[in-house]
Image (tube, grey):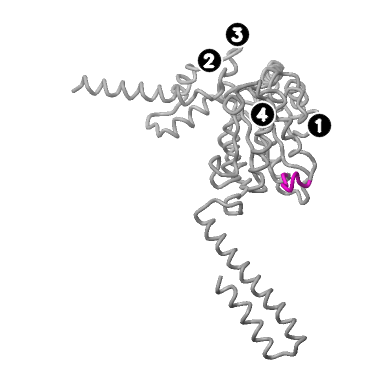
Amino acid sequence: MQVEKWTGTSLASLLLLQSSICVGQFAAVIGTVATAGYLGSVYYQLTSFSCYFYECCSNEYVRNDLAGLKMELKQRVYGQHLVVNTVVNALGAHFSAIDKKKPLVLSFHGWTGGGKNYVTSFIARHLYKKGLQSRYVHQFSGSLHFPEPEKGRLYTEQLQIWVRGNASLCRQSLFIFDEVELMPPGVLNGIKTFMEFREDVDHVDFRDCIFIFLSNTAGSEITRRTFEVWKQGIPREHISLHDMEKAIVESVFNEKGGLQYSHLISRSLIDHFIPFLPLERDHVKLCIRDELLHRGWSGRIDQTVLNEIAERLSYFPKDVGLYSSTGCKHVWQKVGLYMEERTDSSLSHDHFEF
């Protein structure tokens, strides 16, 4: 504080000695500006220094690596062409908008194991240096945070406070709501104001924020339509977002859950409803291959191995066995069991030879 006071005073005194009264008055202003500039420089240096050790809302930590996200989604997400294209393009349009009107709101739908959480983790990883561990990424679970339907009003009030408070820490905050189908209806209406076309709400600007909802609702309708396309001999890659989105909206709005009769839907605040299609056996085998490589499996990885592990999962419809009942969700358990069995077999064989 002594250094800051000395700088302004000394500069003003020096100018006063060399000037008339009029010039002296001007010099006093210059001294104040110089002091303010110095303080600003010190503050910037201290902030930059603290950000070296502590996450800040800056380009170093909020990096928005869309090129990396696109590459990883294409390389590691299988059977979800609508997801890869829509997510990357929606984020790109959001970031490039010169004058944003509202935050970006995405809603992911489909059965368990289709990759909703998987894709969300990639989004967080490429938008924030610390990924899901970033202090600007906020996760909510329907079963964990909103377990009692009768407390809907309390949850609404708490959610409003939590979202507003965290959005004030960083303009680009990411809010993830998982298991939306398990949330009491109406709770999400409490945060609709934050998603509307507004410059700010209580002096907090939400337009750079991103909201993602994950839900199993509309999973049956998505699967039914995908199966119909397959029966017609049409490649699933020919399914368009337009083909699915209207059906998803109708299902989600009427099915029991956090978005049932929601103002977020009736007021068109959700920008994109993105379907996660049911995964076929070939998609599951690609997940198995990735898991074997990830675990450092030293044995061969061929169709015999992939088929053996894939057969340990269940498929539907019964007469066709086309889609995995749990997508790729249980692949890591099945791969782990397979590897342990091979290890035990090898040890037993070595024991008998000895």
Q: Residue 314 carries which label?
A: 2
- Seen at 75% across and 48% down, the residue is 97
Amino acid type shown at disc 2: Ser
Viewer-nearest of discs 4 and 3: 4
Q: Nearer the viewer, residue 192 or 80?
A: 192
- Magenta stretch, residue numbers: 199-206
Left or right position of 22 against 154: right
Q: Residue 267 carries which label?
A: 1
**Secondary structure of residue under mark 4:** helix
Label located before the other in sequence (3 or 1): 1
Q: In this view, does 98 lie above or below 29?
A: above
Measure how far apart labels 3 and 1 are at the Cα level: 42 Å
Label 3: how many residues lie within 10 Å, few (<14), some (14-19) or many (20+)? few
Measure how far apart labels 1 and 2 are at the Cα level: 40 Å
Q: Which residue matches tag 3?
A: 319
**Secondary structure of residue under mark 2:** loop
